[in-house]
Image (tube, helix red, strand yellow):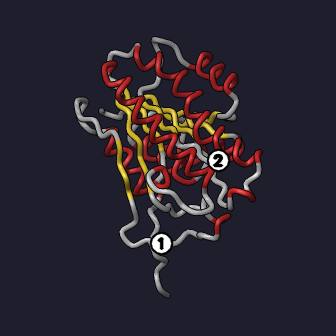
């Protein structure tokens, strides 16, 4: 796919990996609709990236709000070429300390919201004459379990299964689906479990460049899944 002048949606675009992906796509000439709850931070991202970045304050777990935004924004004549499902939430504690609210929040953000926007966008992609691409940001914890991460692991195993079924379903429509499963990323995502960012973690900008590489593959090449790990995950010695 040639990215210049393509239309992309990036969820969780206000910080971390989502912000890095939005930046990489804008620099490739894409119009990027950046979705997140915090409209103020999204406006700051637009100030940094320019008018190609369209800030959209939206609760991805609100199915009706997501569907309404899609209907109001897109049509068969103007639809997205790229959907990056990046928004995610993690709780890292023992199962008996994980509250019902936290469990539901993890499932709603990591899995249900993925379905809400993908099911709304897919008909628009089917109507397009050119190749489209959906990238779901999973996790290494969608492949292996981890103690005190039951909600997160369950949701990310779900993302992987959703992606596997979706690529089989959509490939006849010239729509690619890729599940990207990174290991630890240099953000504050895991701080609640006592894991703090350090230089040996994967850098958001490097992962964003990987997303660009996957998007720019030839139209008949499908990378349906990638696992990306830090070569040396341990913190650097001082």
When the figure is inspected, residue 89 is found, relative to residue 97, above or below; the finding is above
| Percent of width and height locating residue 122 | 47, 21
From the viewer's side, name the closer residue of 159 and 195: 159
From the viewer's side, name the closer residue of 65 and 139: 139
Left or right: where 221 falls relative to 93: left
Q: Residue at x 64, y 66 (%)?
A: 193
| 1 and 2 marks in contact (CB < 8 Å) | no
| Percent of width and height locating residue 190 | 60, 62
| Percent of width and height locating residue 121 | 51, 22
Position of the N terminus, as image quadrant, is: top left
Mark carried by residue 219: none
Q: Residue at x 56, y 54 (%)?
A: 16
Which residue is label 1 attached to? 199
Q: In the rendered picture of this protein, how many numbered marks are placed on residues?
A: 2
Q: Residues within 10 Å of mark 1 (few under 14, many from 20)?
A: few
| Percent of width and height locating residue 123 | 47, 16
Left or right: where 42 falls relative to 96: left
Q: Nearer the viewer, mark 1 or mark 2?
A: 1
When the figure is inspected, residue 114 is found, relative to residue 198, above or below; the finding is above
Left or right: where 150 falls relative to 103: left
Which residue is label 2 attached to? 44
């Amino acid at each position: 796919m040639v990215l210049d002048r393509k239309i992309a949606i990036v969820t969780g675009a206000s910080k971390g990996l989502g912000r890095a992906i939005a930046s990489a796509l804008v620099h490739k000439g894409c119009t990027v609709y950046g979705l997140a709850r915090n409209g103020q931070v999204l406006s700051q991202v637009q100030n940094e990236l320019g008018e190609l970045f369209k800030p959209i304050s939206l609760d991805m777990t609100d199915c009706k709000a997501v569907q309404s935004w899609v209907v109001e924004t897109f049509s068969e004549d103007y639809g997205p070429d790229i959907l990056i499902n990046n928004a995610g939430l993690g709780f890292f504690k023992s199962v008996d300390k994980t509250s019902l609210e936290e469990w539901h929040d993890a499932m709603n953000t990591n899995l249900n919201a993925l379905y809400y926007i993908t099911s709304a966008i897919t008909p628009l992609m089917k109507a397009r004459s050119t190749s489209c691409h959906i990238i779901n940001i999973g996790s290494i914890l969608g492949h292996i379990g981890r103690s005190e991460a039951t909600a997160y692991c369950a949701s990310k195993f779900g993302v992987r299964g959703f992606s596997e079924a979706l690529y089989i379903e959509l490939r006849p429509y010239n729509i690619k689906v890729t599940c990207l499963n990174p290991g630890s990323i240099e953000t504050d995502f895991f701080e609640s479990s006592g894991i703090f960012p350090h230089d040996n973690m994967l850098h958001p900008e490097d992962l964003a460049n990987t997303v660009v590489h996957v998007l720019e593959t030839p139209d008949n090449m499908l990378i349906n899944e990638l696992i990306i790990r830090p070569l040396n995950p341990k913190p650097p010695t001082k």
